[in-house]
Image (cartoon, coloured by chain):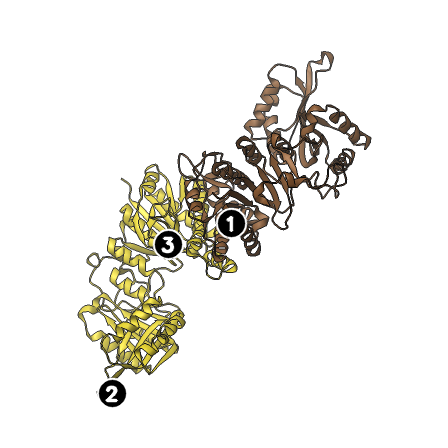
Chain colours: A brown, B yellow
Amino acid sequence: MPETVVMKFGGTSVADAERITRAAGRIVERAREGNHVVAVLSARGKHTDELVSLAHEVSQRPHPRELDMLLSTGERVTCALAAMVINDLGFEAISLTGSQAGIVTDSGHTKAKIIEVKAHRIRQALDSGKVVLVAGFQGVSQRSLDVTTLGRGGSDTTAVALAAALGAEVCEIFTDVAGVFSADPRIVPEARRLPVLTFEEMLEMAASGAGVLQLRSVEYARNHGVTIHCRSSFEEGPGTVIQDEQMTMERPLVTAVTHSTSEARITLLRLPDRPGIAGRVLTALADANVNVDMIIQNEPESEGHSADMSVTVPRDDLPAAREALEGLEDELGFGSVQTDDEMGKVSLVGAGMKSHPGVAAKALTVIGDAGINIEMISTSPIKISCVVREEHVAAAVRELHTAFGLGADSVLPEDVAGDHRPKVSS
Amino acid sequence: MPETVVMKFGGTSVADAERITRAAGRIVERAREGNHVVAVLSARGKHTDELVSLAHEVSQRPHPRELDMLLSTGERVTCALAAMVINDLGFEAISLTGSQAGIVTDSGHTKAKIIEVKAHRIRQALDSGKVVLVAGFQGVSQRSLDVTTLGRGGSDTTAVALAAALGAEVCEIFTDVAGVFSADPRIVPEARRLPVLTFEEMLEMAASGAGVLQLRSVEYARNHGVTIHCRSSFEEGPGTVIQDEQMTMERPLVTAVTHSTSEARITLLRLPDRPGIAGRVLTALADANVNVDMIIQNEPESEGHSADMSVTVPRDDLPAAREALEGLEDELGFGSVQTDDEMGKVSLVGAGMKSHPGVAAKALTVIGDAGINIEMISTSPIKISCVVREEHVAAAVRELHTAFGLGADSVLPEDVAGDHRPKVSS
């Protein structure tokens, strides 16, 4: 019985004819090894952006159902092209739309959730010896049979969902980087590739700025126990394996520093100290589709009976957030709304942190010693995040990376990855 | 009960955002009149050509199934964009792929034939008050549920097939010309728009060079009794109605002059005069997918017991035709194969010709008097075609157009069209 491998190639990996041909070559390698291969492809490089521009040329607010119909064409193009190449290489290949691949979703156009994967058509094709190419990022709605899309980065989720449905050994995600790093190598040149990560670490990293994998695909992988293998499509290399904690060896205290430079902070001054006020504020933000990250509320200073409340939001959401909160001004009677859109965030992630409460103290000291003011702090069992001004983000990342010994010359050997890599990827 | 109208917009009519918006406006006009409207759209201008180039960048012989998957995306893009505009204009609109629209075909990828139209999803959408946009040129194969395409110009066939399935009053075909003309206005400036044509006339015209409608769509319309209304998408105007002969008034003797400048002639010299030889030649050409137009075989001159046989084929098919025939040389023992790829064809079409055998004589005399040599002749009850050298085509067209009084100042009034136009198009 052949092993089933799911491979996913991102937009830069299929940006033009030459790269599509190269990706097809990698897919064929896997098939030649005797595996059942399913490959999920994204749209070519900037193609999705071009389609979005086209939509905005004809409509200020493109109808979501029609936007999905439009955007879903991008992945179909790359899949058809890759299938042509693979057929030319002597392997039978067939491209499937999300709908044909059985990716059944809810009706939440432009950000649909996968409800079910009906993989019988893929299985049938695999059993008859075909390589299967699946258009990523899309599905078909359960109730109305409309084309849906899963939101930006949805192809990662397509790949993980197919890996789960097919019981694949591994879901290989090919991107333009060699794996997941201990920090962004553009900021920390000595950052090292991490051979292995737990789902929880990857979740915290994705949520705090690491762009390699979409948060949602990691959640899906964790929930379904799908091992993810992040690799470069431009070079050979062991990449990064993301898997269940019990499958990994003892984790280091701290694994990586992540960051984001596109945060904004909103502060409501002199908020009356009444029960339910904070809930009212957060509901208003949620209704405006604003993703709130950190929340801090000061205790009222003595008898003043009013408090200040700060939240951070993605910078792009700031206008919507401000509008939503200003609409509450009369109802809640707070003093004023202050905003600052030049905020950033630095986070330290590590599964080993759980049992070592000293990490937070050390991190804060390191940042403070560098003369950087910490504006807000939030923690989880395996993460500590500090909001700092955007201009200080790079320095904070470098200080933490050095202080916690995350570089290539640190205690952990560079390549213990061999132990963790799934068998089929050898 | 509202009337159902099927409208079709060709590639130049949806070439960019502005034209898509204009086409959407025309669709909305029809909906505002209270009709059930189904609009079939082609891909944007040169978009299909671009997709074909992309395929040839990755493969010398793109796999037909995958080529169909690739090409079918073009029409989906325009339909989604038009649906966005129509939604913005306050009408509910929904775009459907060929598959979603129920266009069921055989598995002949890149030139599939429509087997059945399962229009329940369209009907449902129309009944719930939606404008329906259907991606032209494509369907889904009955057996394997793969995306298929109907070949170049297939969107006309999609529109006619939907009109037939929905029992539409009329199928409106919008192009970049004002209708069907008595000759190509680029060659004959005084050519006039023809208000009405029979299916048979339009079939002969489409087969002999008039590019307004695809031959196949006219055949489909005749077989299913669908009235076609050709109109310009860039100006208001009565256009040309194509309908059953019994619905039209007495037809003029001659309706139009058509022409083609991309013919080639192949002559087999000294072919042995044995039964079955001609059949063998034509079978070989058919096997090579060459479309033979005219066939002429000379009687053997006295006792020589050999004849010459000439056929005309589309110029693009000449290499394939020559190859096929040269393969027969040993088997059949003919003298040699001569080819000439600078041939053209001029045809005179008119339903009234049937009962007036004098037309052919007059046509040949007119061309001869202009000093143009006629190389081959073929006739049907309502058409006479003459093969002439390509350089003489324009002159022959002009001479015939004048001699048969087809110009705007001829006997027939310019606008008797009002009588023939379907009610809904008023």
A32 or B267: nearer the eye?
Answer: A32
Within-10-Å neighbours for mark 1: few <14, some 14–19, many 20+: many
Left or right of B52 on screen, residue B151:
left
Left or right of B388 on screen, residue A106:
right
User: Which chain is disc 2 placed on?
Assistant: B
Q: Which one is closest to the eye, mark 3 or mark 1?
A: 1
Does residue B198 show up?
A: no
Left or right of A136 on screen, residue A202:
right
Residues at marks 3 and 1, CA–CA distance in whole angstroms: 38 Å
Determine whether B201 is above or below A163 in the image: below
Tags 3 and 1 in contact by the CB under 8 Å rule?
Answer: no
Determine whether B74 is above or below B183 in the image: above
Q: Secondary structure at mark 3?
A: helix
**Residue that extends furthest to the top in the rendered view of this protein:** A303
User: Which chain is disc 3 placed on?
Assistant: B
- Of pointers 3 and 2, the one earlier in the residue sequence: 3
Left or right of B96 on screen, residue B204:
left
Q: Secondary structure at mark 1?
A: helix
Q: Secondary structure at mark 2?
A: helix
Which residue has dot 3 on it? B155
**Residue that extends furthest to the front in the rendered view of this protein:** A1
Which residue has dot 1 on it? A31
Residues marked 2 and 1, same chain: no
Residue type for callout 2? Gly
At which x and y percent is residue B64? Answer: 42, 56
Determine whether A259 is above or below B314 in the image: above
Does residue B308 show up?
A: yes
Determine whether A409 is above or below B18 in the image: above
Q: Which one is closest to the eye, mark 2 or mark 1?
A: 1
Which residue has dot 2 on it? B304
